[in-house]
Image (cartoon, rainbow, N blue to C red):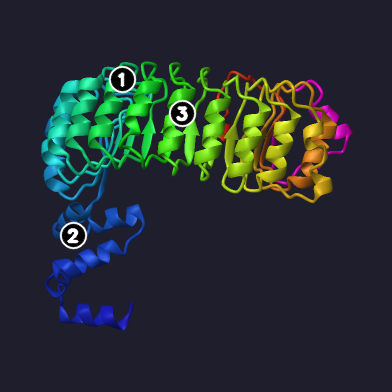
Amino acid sequence: MSKLNEEIISKGVCINETLTDDELRSILSKLDNYKDKEGFGLVCKKWLYLQSTERMKLCARAGPLMLKKMAARFSKIVELDLSQSLSRSFYPGVTDSDLSVVSNGFTSLQTLHLNNCKGITDKGLVELGKGLPRLQSLDLSYCRKLTDKGLTAIAEGCPNLRNLHLVGCRFITDETLIALSKNCPRLEALALQGCINITDSGLSSLVVKCRKIKFLDVSKCTNVGDAGILSVSESCSSLTTLKLLDCLKAGDDSIYSLARSCKNLETLVIGGCRNISDASIKSLVFSCNHKLKFLRMDWCLSISDSALSCILSLCKNLEALDIGCCEEVTDRAFQDLASSGFESSLKILRISSCPKITVFGITKLLESCKTLEYLDVRSCPHITEWDCDQAGLLFPAYCKVNFTGSLSGSDALIDMFV
């Protein structure tokens, strides 16, 4: 026991009489660990009150009455998570009544997570729009009852909105994008995956005033094509992430426009875009090779050795690459890597269902890819575990090689990156 503690005990000094509230708050602010902050509140009622009023984040599963009590206790909350699990949910889950409480009680809120809250409707969003003018980030993914009416209310009431996730909101149309353009010029990230009613016209309207977008996900938006992507790339030169998974109408014109205007592109997902050719990919690589980190181009059936060789030899910072089902790719794409002295930063490579790649190609790849952590060679007839053992291949120490498994299943390591 320190001399200071002994002196305090001997004199019968009460710490709450010695230290002011501001001094106690200063001590609390220096605790980085969440458990330590919770422990702070267990000392006494006064410390619990201070810990409650200083709390910034809250994750809750509660009805309106409990939410009201939480709002009164945690007055400085800026981030609230009410999201529900896909596999496990409670009845009735988050409702419009809950959102009314949130709007009236958590007025300092900047971030709100409501993903998978399938019970909420436009009525609840209208309430949020009335009471959360400071809101900057909102996740409504898989809230399937929402329409343009609710999202328009959010856009009009939350002008500081910067991040909006609407994945799986199938009823959303271009009207929502028009409302965002009119009211939310600071928007930086927009996720619209699976919003099948979004069109090129909507994207063109969006970027009339939303020119700061850095992240855009329009994967599985089947009505989005070259015209919409051209508008986005020309208006949002700061774009760093673009996801176009299964956008069959997107082709070479989209890639050329990105090459011309978006020099800071780091992540590009064009899996399933079958009209994209070697020429446009090479143009993109020459333009963005110093920035590009994650590239997914599985099922781009026109891609061949020419494009892949260009990617591997010029993109020094590339960390994840998916060329699954690109059936025209052969060993030749890897052949000149080692001879050029190139050292790749590649950590994840997926070449599943590429029938023309053999163990020889993998051998050449490994000579220049010393940092590889994951290699997917499922359904490659000429690359089996036995073939690799017979060839004496030495994979990096921490590299996982996936030889078997269902191609239809989710691949966590790939999903993590792209």
Nearer to me, 40 or 391: 391
Nearer to me, 315 or 401: 315
Q: Which label sits on residue 202?
A: none
Q: Secondary structure at mark 3?
A: helix
Disc on the earlier residue, 3 or 1:
1
Please indicate whether residue 241 sits to the left or right of residue 140 in the image.
right
Q: Which residue is mark 1?
A: 172
Q: Which residue is mark 2?
A: 47
Can residue 28 be seen from the camera position used here?
yes
Q: Is residue 304 magenta?
A: no
- The picture places residue 242, in percent across and down from the top left corner, at 48, 34
Disc on the earlier residue, 3 or 2:
2
Nearer to me, 383 or 316: 316
Please state, as top left, top right, bottom left or bottom right, where the N terminus lies in the image: bottom left
Please indicate whether residue 253 sits to the left or right of residue 344 in the image.
left
Q: Residues within 10 Å of mark 2 (few under 14, many from 20)?
A: some
Please indicate whether residue 345 sits to the left or right of residue 54 in the image.
right
Q: Amino acid at mark 3?
A: Ile
Q: Residues within 10 Å of mark 3 (few under 14, many from 20)?
A: many
- The picture places residue 113, in percent across and down from the top left corner, at 30, 35
Q: Is residue 392 magenta?
A: yes
Q: Secondary structure at mark 2?
A: helix
Q: Amino acid at mark 2?
A: Trp
Nearer to me, 194 or 6: 194
Residue at 68% in and 28% down: 278
Q: Range of the magenta residues?
A: 380-402
Can residue 322 be seen from the camera position used here?
no
Q: What is the distance, in whole Å, between disc 3 and disc 2 at their CAs?
A: 54 Å
Q: Amino acid at mark 1?
A: Ile
When asked about the image quadrant of residue 323, the answer is top right
Q: Nearer the viewer, mark 3 or mark 1?
A: 3
Q: Which residue is mark 3?
A: 229
